[in-house]
Every structure is written in structure tokens, then in C-alpha cells.
Amino acid sequence: MFRIKDHIISLVAVFLALGLGILIGTSLSDEMLITQQRLLIEQMTKEQKGLREEQRAMESRLQIVNHDLSLWKKYQEALYPILVDGALTGKRLSVIVHGAEMPPGVLEMLRDADAILCNVIHIKERQALNAATSGLGTALVALAANELLTTEMEKSLASFIADGRILLERLERGTPDAVILVLGEQEFADKRLVNELVAGLPRERFTVVGLECSSVRASLFEQLKAAGISTIDNADTVFGHFSLLAVLRGSAGNFGIKPSADQLMANF
């Protein structure tokens, strides 16, 4: 027979069971959370320890590298006058720069080597030229070679020089023994002009060498190499400087740090 007392006892038992279950579940959840937090802290501690060890190792390697760089700098300073001073005595040079800046240290090194700079010609970037350049390369070759310009050549050069699109430094008279062609990125170069320069520079009369900085990515050197012109793709470094000296003294080839180079440095 159903009694209300039994019903109440059953309900109380159910609620006690639910409460006990919630209490146990909460306890277990807290323990799991604490365990997870403990594991996370241990993992972060290990990672921090590993990072500290890596930092110490990197600092140690950096000290070694700085020491090596210091020794290399001292070696350069000792080697520079031995290799450079007087290395190009009496050698007459003309320089043509197009779509680029003169690589740092090159002109200073050439002067230290007692080279004679006949001309330094700066040609603005293709976008700044803003005119038809057909025939301009031929005129510039004659200018770099210190040859007499025809009336047509003078007309071709006149407007470019007048408004500063071509900057000319005439330093010495006389025919150069070598012409240095400094180029930058393809996007800044007038390819027709470069082709005329390459075709017009007579290798049987004087040495021709192409220079570019290490940072140049889209190079124009394939045109120069196809024409048999020596190239140096790291002219902003001491290795490039020494390669330039070597080429001006008679070495030939393609030197530098890029895939197109045959070797790092020319034989001095």
C-alpha cells in the first residue's frame, strides 16, 4: 500500500544521490583542473629553461662571431694597403653608372690604387630619361673613350646633359685602358641603351667589367656575360673590390655570390 512517508523518503534519497553526485563531480573537476594547471606550469617551466639555454648558446655563438669579425676587420686593414696601394698605377679608367648608385668604396679604392679616372658618367633611371634613347649609347661610348664626338652625337647628348638626366664628371683627358659599367635592377634600366653600351664598348681596345651590388635581384648581367664581359655581382663588399682590382689587372670571368657567378673572387 502506497504511503506518503515512503514517497518522501524516496525523494530525499534521490536528491541526496544527486547532491552527492554533483559534489563528487565537482571535486573531480577541481582535481583535474589543478592537475592540468600543474602540468601546464611544468611544461612552461621546461620551455622557459630551454629558451634560456638557447639564449645562452646564441650569446656564446654571437661572441665568437664578433671575435671572428674583429679579427677579419684587422686582417682586411692589414691586407688592404698590401694589395691596393699602387696596384693600378697609371691605369686609366672611365666609369658609366646607369640605374644604380656607385657601389660604396669603389671609387675610393680605385684612387688608393693610383688609377687615373678619366670620366665618371651617371645616367639616370629609365623612368627619368623619359625620351627616345636610340643612338645615345653609341654617343656615351665615345664620351667614355674620350673620343671626338660627331655633331649627331653631341645633339644626342645635349638635352640629357643640359637637364641633368646624364651627369658627366670629366677628370682627365686621354684614352682609358678600361671601362667599368655599373648597373642596377632591370626595372630601372633602359635595355636598348644597355645593349648599345655593351655592343659599342670594344673589348679589343680596353678591358670592360660590369659591376652590381649584392642587393640587386633582377640582374642585367646575362647580357654582359653573353658579350664576354667580366662581371662582379658583389661590388659593395671587400671581396668584390679585390675582384675588381684583379680584373683590371688582367683576370677575367664572372665573380661574386650569386648563382650566375663562377667563383667568389678573381685570382689576384
Image (cartoon, helix red, strand yellow):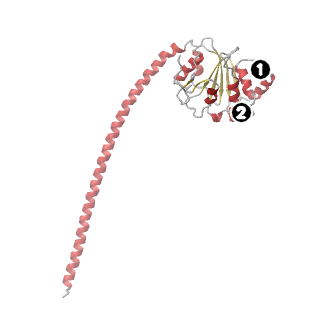
Q: Position of residue 152 (x, y in %)?
A: 80, 25
Q: Position of residue 92 (x, y in %)?
A: 65, 15
Q: Position of residue 162 (x, y in %)?
A: 75, 27
Residue depicted at 77% across the width and 20% down the height: 149
Q: Quadrant of the N terminus?
A: bottom left
Q: Quadrant of residue 50?
A: top left
Q: Secondary structure at mark 1?
A: loop
Mark 2 Cα within 10 Å, few/some/many (few <14, many 20+)? some
The reply to whether dot 1 and dot 2 touch (C-beta < 8 Å) is no
Picture disc at residue 135: none
Q: Quadrant of residue 175?
A: top right
Who is closer to the viewer here, 174 or 63?
174
Residue depicted at 33% across the width and 43% down the height: 47
Residue corresponding to mark 2:
129
Q: Secondary structure at mark 2?
A: helix
Give the side of residue 141 with respect to residue 102, left or right. right
Instruction: Say above or below: 37 vs 171.
Output: below
Tag nearer the camera, 1 or 2: 1
State the CA–CA distance, disc 1 to disc 2.
Answer: 21 Å
Residue depicted at 38% across the width and 27% down the height: 64
Residue depicted at 21% across the width and 85% down the height: 4
Q: Position of residue 68 (x, y in %)?
A: 41, 24
Who is closer to the viewer here, 147 or 267?
267
Mark 1 Cα within 10 Å, few/some/many (few <14, many 20+)? some
Q: Amino acid at mark 2?
A: Leu
Q: Residue furthest right?
A: 151
Q: Amino acid at mark 1?
A: Leu
Residue corresponding to mark 1:
149
Give the side of residue 187 with respect to residue 72, left or right. right
